[in-house]
Image (cartoon, rainbow, N blue to C red):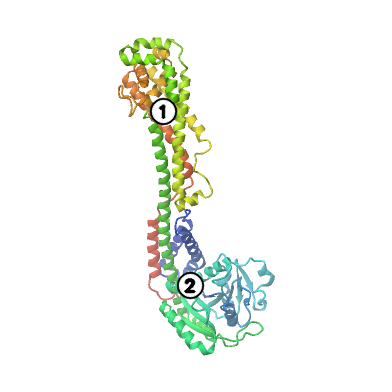
Amino acid sequence: MLPEGQDRGAADAVELLEESRGTLELLDLPLDVPGAVEARAAIRAAVAQLDDYILPRYRRLEAPLLAVVGGSTGAGKSTLVNALAGYPATRAGAIRPTTRQPVLLHHPSDAGWFTDRRILPGLSRITGTPADAAPEAHTGGAEQAAEPAGTSLVLLADRSIPAGVAVLDAPDIDSISDDNRRLAGQLLAAADLWIFVTTANRYADAVPWALLLDAAQRDIEVAVVLDRVPADVELEVRTDLAGLLQRQGLAAAKLFVIYESTLDGQGMLPAGAVDPIRAWLEELAADASSRADIARRTLGGAVRSLAGTVRAAAVAADDQYAASQRLRKIVDRAYEAATVQALAATQDGTLLRGEVLARWQDFVGTGEFFRGIESGIGRLRDRIGAFFSGKPAPSVVVEAAIESGLQAVVVEAAAKGTEQADAGWRVDPAGQGLLGDGDLSTPSAGFSAEVAREIRAWQADLLDLIRSEGEDKRFTARMLSFGVNGLGVALMVVIFAATGGLTGLEIGVAGGTAVVGQKLLEAVFGEDAVRRLARKARSQLEDRTRRLMDAEAERFLSRVPPQEQQAEAMRLLAEKLHAVGSTPDREAPE
């Protein structure tokens, strides 16, 4: 419902509007998905309009109407405002852009409505007098010059402006200055009604019509001033413009004509040139009911437009959430594949080739020993003591070879995962924005060293498992005869040779190599215990491998801002706003 004094309905509406403002202000759209730039701009504009116009107007419907004079560069906006005031109240000249600082003319009795920053609170106030006005400086002399252009509002009290209506001269909507265009849009969004100025040869330009169509959608009161019209073509131009207005849903717009004429030495129009416009403003000012109707209609349109912005913001929030999930999936899949690749190499015998296999064979003995194993597995236990009575290569050599081989496998897999994640983000606009100039296509600088540390830590954990198992089964003496490190190396070899865990004599590509380790471990711990040890050690290796990959993935994932699913709540908010903006007008408050 639209505001009626301070009744409960108005208070509820204000609360809803304040909730909407908070929701929009807190909405973060950090990802560069298609449409994000436009959505951010629309949200900023909506928050500004809530502060500048919607909330202030909702709270004080009886405040004077603000008529904003807008239009294209050189259309004659400032000249019109000066004519309404009866003296050069604002700058008007050939240098573009002309209107650098907005001037608001109001009746002296209405000063309190504008000096307290009820509307446009972000603009500081400069108070001037008619005597200060001059083409060189809008008003206020040195006081005004101290304010940066576009950050202040010049207030000019004058009895030539009827009480109940204020007139604000806005910058050009198509100004070459970005700040001027932004300010023009801000001021028009804070208007109760628009006085749109165009010329006989520019009234069909695209830029002003884009704003007029926006006015039609917002149901805002519009008056169109057709400036510099040669008397001999007035009927033709007026008829054509009226037809355009009707076709675009603006048939109710007031249409005024200012004939082409010569300005005097102060750039003023001839006396009487704007009398019809002044009379219209005085008529509005004299009728409180009409003013309230205009305020309600414009306010309702603004709230409905706000509802549309909130709906669009919900779509943008959905897009952001979908993009964040998409980017995370790209990374998750890349590093999951890298983890699977690394772990597969620890199960299919890949690691028991080359250096690792050679060092293990050096450790356990000669080829003749293996021929003895193959011809009689049962004699293994008898020969094991003799085997360990010699001086084989230290187990640490095998451990180092395993560390080196496993490190190479993990680093290679991580490099592939990193490359895939980077490539996936590079082809996604949101990913491109997060990567920027950064290069994440290779593993982090210290990754290889970190992998080596994790592998050594895993090897230490594995030895702890063997010690713990030996203590539980009271095989300490036998363990000492074989050596904890030797048993640890045997367990590593068995883990890397077996596929899918230990299943008796089932071994991987290393062939008879793993039989020695398998039987040695079973002789010490028993078959069930060996199977349990292998599962535990493999699980620990998987955990450490995943942590390594997760840490690398975090380089990408840490760049993805957290996103909450809030679109549905925003859509519900939009429906409430639309209901508020669409409630039929009621009588103006007393």
Task: Give the residue at the far right of this rendering.
Answer: 142
**Residue at image mark 1:** 351
Q: In which quarter of the image is the C terminus?
A: bottom left
User: Of the residues shown, which amino acid type is indicated by label 1?
Assistant: Leu
In terms of sequence position, does the residue under pointer 2 or pointer 1 come before the other?
A: 2
Image coordinates for residue 340, horizontal then vertical, percent: 38, 36
Q: Nearer the viewer, mark 2 or mark 1?
A: 1
For the question of whether residue 28 can be seen, the reply is no
Q: In which quarter of the image is residue 384?
A: top left
Left or right: 405, with 102 as reference point? left
Q: Which of 444 and 457 is in front in this view?
A: 444
Question: Mark 2 falls on what kind of element?
Answer: helix
Distance between the Cα atoms at labels 2 and 1?
Answer: 71 Å
Image coordinates for residue 2, horizontal then vertical, percent: 42, 70
**Residue at image mark 2:** 211
User: Of the residues shown, which amino acid type is indicated by label 2?
Assistant: Leu
Image coordinates for residue 203, horizontal then vertical, percent: 50, 79
